[in-house]
Image: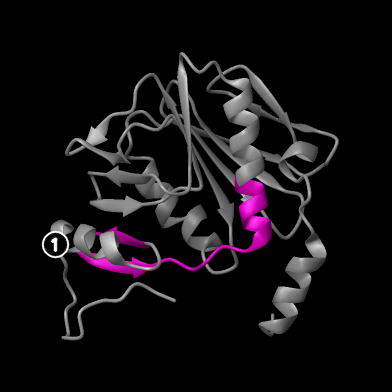
Amino acid sequence: MTTTLPTTEQHYFTEEQYLALEETAEDKSEYLDGEIIPMTGGSTNHNRLAGNVYIALNLALPEQEYDVFIGDVRLWVPKVRLYTYPDVMVILGKPEYHNNRTDMITNPQVIVEVLSKSTRNYDRGDKFAFYKSIPTLREYILIDQTKIKVEQYSKTENKRWLYSEYDEEDTALVFNSFQLEVPLSAIYKKVNFEEVEKENNQSGV
């Protein structure tokens, strides 16, 4: 199900209206400069991939230095007025909260998104452009759920973004924001590609 919006025609919503709707909505939505965009539900593989990355990061990173969040924590991107829910975020130091709300942060160092059929172009394009405006962001990771493929964008000192791609199960994702390697076999643990093929066939893909 999608977020229930007011029955009257309304094309622009204030941040306050959006946040009030999110408090009681059955499903999450994004907010982009006055527009509310319902988010699609995640598949079991989507959940496994996000969970695998969260576990690997949470276990490996020093808890005194880093916080790792998954799914339900909202990100506020002020430059484009975007509220969204990244699959996984890593924060260096303490979270910086928007309007003192502990469910909304502003300072991720790493963002991880699991690609879905309906959002993969958005995640690679406009959404990445929005994320680039976050001063603290140093790394953006995209994980394909239809095959073994991880894309990595790392911010360099001259503010350019270096692209790397990983597509072999016996390799490891090497993070540039901190000294950590996560094997792709750990990221794709229990992921069933036959389930994805079945979902695609049922949807006529």
Q: Amino acid at mark 1?
A: Thr
Foreground residue, 49 or 26? 26
Question: Quadrant location of the N terminus?
Answer: bottom left
Foreground residue, 182 or 151? 182
Picture layout, residue 78 above or below residue 59: below
Picture layout, residue 119 above or below residue 64: below
Residue range in magenta is: 29-50
Foreground residue, 132 or 147? 147
Residue at image x 59%, y 37%?
54
Compared across the picture, whether 142 is left or right of 17 comes to: right
Residue designated by label 1 = 14
Compared across the picture, whether 42 is left or right of 2 comes to: right
Q: Residue furthest right?
A: 170
Residue 29, horizontal then vertical, whole percent: 36, 63
Q: Inspect this view and state whether residue 33 appears.
A: no
**Residue 184, picture quadrant:** top right
Q: Is residue 150 magenta?
A: no
Q: Is residue 40 magenta?
A: yes
